[in-house]
Image (cartoon, rainbow, N blue to C red):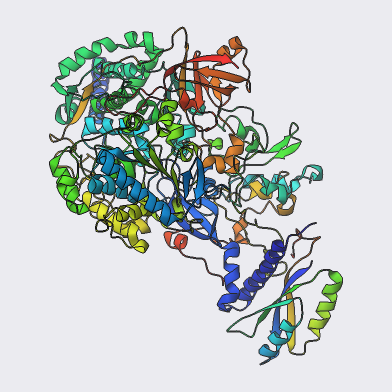
């Protein structure tokens, strides 16, 4: 009897071996062809991508007292942007010229907080998943220009003129590409005072605040003029 | 420099007269809808005092039925919200 | 608070706009008269139009916001499969390059050493008469045109048709010779047809990325971000194989440093290791590849009139194997500075049949005195393992200029090229002549000068007239002084078409103001064979005229009205439609004009209404023979070539007098010679001038700190540059790095004009330099 069990045991092992071996043999023979899924429509940045990210901080923001001595204002907010929507340049010296943002920039710009060295609160990036920060954000090492520019800086959006009715929720007066996460600029101690939202705990911003300028969602809208009502 | 905009409704059939009289007042700019009896008014004055005078003038216009402010700017509250 | 009047007007408009919006919500369907709305439309609602980015060869889709006839904002085009909505700092600020205060708006003619304004008509008359008289006195081959990969497709096509077809000289070259030609000869010798088989979509499938001397984080940041994104999602591996530590090294999972020029040996060692470990994909190699060897010890082209022709000879696998015996990891490790372990590490990734590998490179292997070989060697690795032409398995040669592929390589604005084929081939000449409407005898069967030799010919007096468009050779030529002196010799006539004053316009006899980018209509072709159209969105300033139309005007004045009978309002469409005829057929068909206008670019071969993403693979490429699986149809036998290419030393190595290696390159902020990006305040303020990077140990020994002035001397010249220690990059000990964008600190005064004998592309990455504290 004992012998039968031993035989069964080894034959099971043997069968298992054959199965495993076969599987690995056949998968080794598989051609390296990768099937490409049927062409999908382009992966657009959905307009509300990231609107909810960072919302877990909303409640915390609500409890945060206003630190009026260290508030930013809208004017300075636009100072280091070439136009409304341009990536801001870095207004402070950087620690490490070479490293990826994931090890330097994000230390402060992921969650924010007070930085005593600069006597300011670190603004929070709306896109922490993009870590080659210096691809778009550069430092300022001189005030001088190579040649004067005649570029016209467009008036940026201002506050107080975006309501349809007295008391109605203001529309979003700027484009949101690359800054779909509303709370990163509109809440917390680093938010410019004028645009700091009174109700950061409400996550679904676009429920009430709609885009004044439709983000482009298809080619049609890219190429045709938006018309007024 | 208060700048304010209003939605203005005329009495029935008096739209033309209202546009004319509003246009004749200094500091008023008018835009009218083509398919509704509605007029948009933008006022532009140097200070609060002038603003008050202008308002009285506008209120004196007979063909005006109803007027409601939509938005306003003044030097002090460029950043304040109407809400 | 001081308030400007325009601010007041603006507020009034805003007030009116709010009222309108409100009225619209209260009374749906309300309408206002056109003129009332007119002034307001531009207020928030910019007009957005698509274009490829003006700068590098990645070819990102951008949306340009215009208002009142000015470009005021940029967004990444979410519909573009290239960048999917993300740009880099240059792209986001690209429109500001249109508005530098010193924009050239009037033609200028040099009279007694100073430039005098003139009318466009007179300037074009002068150019035409000067060209005609030069041809009469010195022959057809005494006039030349030098353009670049910044030429739009119609620019390059017009230049080629005018010079090669009508005048009958092959004196057509482009700056791309200095940056892409090794990639071209690499493709031609390995596959018989130019440009990558794969595309950017490979990034979404590959498991391992090997960057060959390519600081991608700064040079191709948008594609690098796509790789980083994949790493976050799928945990892919990035290997940075370079001579210097950069941001890319910091981001990579593994940074491997090699000694200059030894990339040749390391690539061979990887092949050795693949064979030694039995990792060769034998069925692929036997079905789809042949082995060849070429000439060795070819020289470096340092002498005038240097000529070289490779003589390929078939060899067998055994001979190739024996050749590789000299490249065991152990032997190569001794002089490459790469450890045996690291060579085997790379070979293991290439050799693993379950790993998909993408190799990426740009100027490292291209600007190399053995550039063609280096390109061949990377293909060798992919061919031996069969990792090619399938999604994720991709040797991918990146480009630096927006249309290096689209114009220089596809239209063929190089001395030996025609839009389809080469001038040496009679069939090809006849084919082109037919479309161009010229007698076939017009096209000369003999290639003339490649770029370096063209400037040498100008120096010697063989060339007397040169027209330079959209490029800045007085910053980019190696061993600059000789070629600058050449242009200033008596009896040389130089025409420069540009948008800003540069060191090149300084040496011009006539300067033509050009319309730039979206001030005219055009097309660019990027690295992944994608042709992208942009329309005219702005009016060019002053008399500025597109390069295409400048050429058309002069060609007509020289009696070629028939060949250049285009209508001004539709000439770009007409030229593009004519150009397409050269590429008809499954192997290279270009998308129709209407399709390009509607889409964020299309990849050639465009067959049956579809872009081809992976060439040479029967599953994706309709040009492949049926049942072939893989068909490298560029070569008559349908097979790709695995080349036996040895390691050879560079022409100049550090010695006692000049003990350091000098490498040159770019920074993320500036593009090419900086004539555009330096006029963008944000970019100039971020990177105001050139610098020299030293290894911290060397700096310490020489007592040099960041900001100290350093004198660099080579056998060609000297310059003084401030030092940068431990900043953007860190070179290895006894090596220095200097970016070339700064026209006030011209590093190319120092570089050597040695080039790859096959591609004729100079090596800007290696020469010997002396370093002293100034």
Residue C238 pos. (x, y %): 43, 28
Q: If the image is split into quadrants, where does the C terminus of chain C sit? A: top right
| Residue at 69 percent of width and 62 percent of height | C6
Q: C722 and C9: which one is in front?
A: C722
Q: Position of residue C505 (x, y in %)?
A: 47, 41
Please state if B10 lies on the left or on the right of C753 as rendered. right
Q: Is residue A35 visible?
A: no
Decide: is C148 above or below C215.
below
As drawn, which residue projects farthest toward the bottom? B13
Q: Nearer the viewer, residue C624 or C508?
A: C508
| Residue positioned 59% across, 49% down in the render | A181
Q: Nearer the viewer, residue C517 or C405?
A: C517
Q: Position of residue A26 (x, y in %)?
A: 23, 30
Height in image: B2 above or below C549? below
Residue at position x 59%, y 9% in the image: C701
Q: Seen in the image, is A93 located left or right of residue C126?
A: right
């Amino acid at each position: 009897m004992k012998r039968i069990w031993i035989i069964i045991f080894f034959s099971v092992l043997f069968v298992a071996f054959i199965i495993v071996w076969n599987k690995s043999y056949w998968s080794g023979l598989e051609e390296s062809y990768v099937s490409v899924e049927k062409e999908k429509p382009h992966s657009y940045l959905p307009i509300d991508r990231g609107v909810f990210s960072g919302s877990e901080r909303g409640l915390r923001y609500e409890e945060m007292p206003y630190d009026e001595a260290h508030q930013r204002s809208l004017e300075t907010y636009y100072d280091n942007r070439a136009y409304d929507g341009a990536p801001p340049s870095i207004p402070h010296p950087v620690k490490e010229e070479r490293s990826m943002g994931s090890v330097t920039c994000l230390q402060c710009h992921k969650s924010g907080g007070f930085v005593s060295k600069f006597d300011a609160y670190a603004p929070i990036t709306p896109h922490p998943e993009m870590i080659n920060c210096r691809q778009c954000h550069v430092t300022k090492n001189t005030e001088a220009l190579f040649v004067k520019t005649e570029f016209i800086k467009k008036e940026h959006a201002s506050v107080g003129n975006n309501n349809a009715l007295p008391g109605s929720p203001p529309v979003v007066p700027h484009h949101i590409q690359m800054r779909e996460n509303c709370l990163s600029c509109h809440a917390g101690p680093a938010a410019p005072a004028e645009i700091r939202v009174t109700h950061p705990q409400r996550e679904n911003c676009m429920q009430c605040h709609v885009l004044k300028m439709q983000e482009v969602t298809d080619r049609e809208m890219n190429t045709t003029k938006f018309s007024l009502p | 420099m208060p700048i304010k905009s209003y939605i203005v409704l005329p009495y029935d059939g008096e739209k033309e007269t209202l546009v004319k009289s509003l246009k004749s007042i200094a500091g008023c700019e008018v835009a009218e809808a083509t398919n509704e009896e509605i007029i948009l008014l933008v006022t532009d004055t140097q200070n609060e005092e002038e603003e008050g005078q202008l308002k009285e003038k506008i209120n004196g216009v007979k063909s005006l039925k109803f007027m409601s402010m939509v938005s306003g700017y003044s030097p002090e509250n460029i950043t304040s919200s109407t809400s | 608070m001081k308030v400007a009047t325009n601010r007041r007007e603006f507020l009034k408009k805003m007030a009116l706009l709010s009222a309108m919006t409100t009225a619209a919500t209260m009374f749906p369907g309300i309408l206002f008269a056109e003129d009332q709305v007119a002034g307001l439309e531009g207020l928030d609602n910019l007009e957005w139009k698509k274009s490829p980015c003006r700068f590098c060869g990645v070819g990102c889709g951008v949306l340009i916001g215009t208002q009142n006839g000015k470009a005021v904002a940029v967004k990444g085009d979410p519909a573009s499969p290239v960048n999917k909505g993300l740009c880099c700092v240059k792209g986001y600020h690209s429109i500001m390059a249109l508005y530098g205060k010193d924009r050239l708006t009037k033609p200028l003619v040099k009279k007694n050493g100073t430039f005098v304004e003139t009318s466009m008509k007179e300037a074009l008359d002068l150019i035409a008469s000067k060209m005609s008289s030069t041809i009469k006195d010195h022959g057809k081959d005494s006039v030349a045109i030098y353009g670049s990969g910044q030429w739009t497709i119609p620019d390059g096509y017009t230049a080629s048709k005018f010079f090669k077809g009508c005048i009958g000289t092959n004196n057509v070259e482009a700056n791309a010779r200095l940056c892409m030609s090794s990639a071209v000869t690499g493709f031609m010798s390995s596959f018989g047809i130019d440009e990558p088989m794969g595309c950017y979509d490979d990034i979404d499938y590959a498991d391992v990325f090997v960057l060959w001397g390519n600081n991608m984080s700064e040079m191709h940041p948008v594609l690098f971000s796509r790789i980083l994104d994949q790493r976050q999602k799928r945990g892919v591996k990035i290997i940075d194989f370079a001579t210097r530590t950069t941001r890319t090294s910091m981001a990579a999972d593994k940074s491997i440093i090699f000694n200059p020029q030894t990339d040749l040996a390391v690539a061979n060692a990887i092949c050795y290791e693949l064979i030694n470990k039995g990792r060769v994909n034998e069925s692929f190699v036997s079905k789809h590849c042949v082995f060849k060897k070429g000439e060795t010890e070819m020289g470096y082209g340092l002498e005038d009139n240097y000529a070289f022709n490779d003589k390929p000879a078939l060899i067998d696998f055994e001979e190739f194997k024996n050749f590789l015996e000299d490249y065991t990891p152990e032997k190569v490790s001794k002089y490459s500075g790469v450890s045996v372990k690291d060579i085997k590490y790379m070979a293991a990734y290439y050799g693993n049949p379950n790993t998909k590998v993408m190799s990426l490179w740009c100027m490292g292997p291209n600007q190399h005195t053995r550039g063609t070989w280096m390109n061949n060697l990377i293909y060798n690795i992919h061919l031996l393992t069969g990792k090619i032409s399938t999604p994720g398995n991709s040797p991918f040669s990146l480009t630096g200029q927006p249309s290096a592929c689209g114009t220089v390589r596809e239209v063929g604005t190089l001395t030996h090229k025609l839009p389809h084929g080469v001038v040496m081939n009679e069939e090809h000449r006849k084919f082109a002549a037919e479309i161009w409407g010229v007698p076939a005898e017009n096209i000369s069967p003999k290639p003339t000068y490649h770029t370096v030799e063209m400037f040498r010919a100008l120096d010697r007096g063989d060339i007397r007239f040169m027209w330079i468009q959209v490029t800045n050779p007085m910053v980019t030529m190696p061993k600059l002084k000789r070629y600058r002196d050449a242009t200033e010799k008596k009896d040389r006539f130089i025409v420069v078409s540009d948008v800003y004053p540069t060191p090149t316009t300084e040496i011009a006899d006539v300067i033509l103001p050009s319309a730039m980018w979206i001030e005219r209509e055009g097309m660019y072709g990027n690295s992944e064979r994608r042709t992208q159209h942009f329309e005219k969105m702005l009016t060019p300033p002053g008399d500025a005229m597109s390069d295409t139309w400048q050429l058309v005007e002069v060609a007509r004045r020289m009696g070629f009205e028939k060949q250049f009978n285009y209508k001004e309002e539709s000439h770009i469409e007409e030229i593009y439609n004519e150009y397409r005829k050269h590429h008809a057929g499954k192997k290279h068909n270009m998308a129709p004009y209407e399709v390009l206008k509607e889409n964020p670019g299309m990849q050639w071969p465009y067959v049956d209404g579809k872009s081809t993403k992976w060439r040479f693979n029967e599953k994706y490429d309709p040009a492949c023979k049926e049942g072939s699986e893989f068909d490298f149809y560029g070569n008559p036998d349908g097979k790709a070539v695995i080349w036996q290419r040895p390691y050879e030393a560079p022409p100049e190595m550090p010695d006692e007098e000049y003990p350091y290696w000098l490498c040159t390159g770019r920074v993320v902020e500036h593009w090419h010679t900086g004539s555009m990006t330096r006029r963008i305040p944000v970019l100039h303020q971020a990177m105001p001038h050139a610098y020299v990077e030293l290894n911290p140990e060397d700096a310490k020994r020489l007592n040099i700190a960041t900001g100290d002035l350093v004198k660099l001397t080579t056998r060609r010249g000297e310059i003084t540059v401030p030092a940068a220690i431990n900043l953007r990059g860190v070179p290895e000990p006894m090596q220095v790095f200097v970016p070339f964008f700064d026209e006030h600190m011209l590093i190319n005064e120092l570089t050597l004009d040695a080039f790859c004998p096959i591609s004729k592309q100079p090596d800007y990455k290696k020469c010997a330099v002396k370093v002293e504290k100034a």
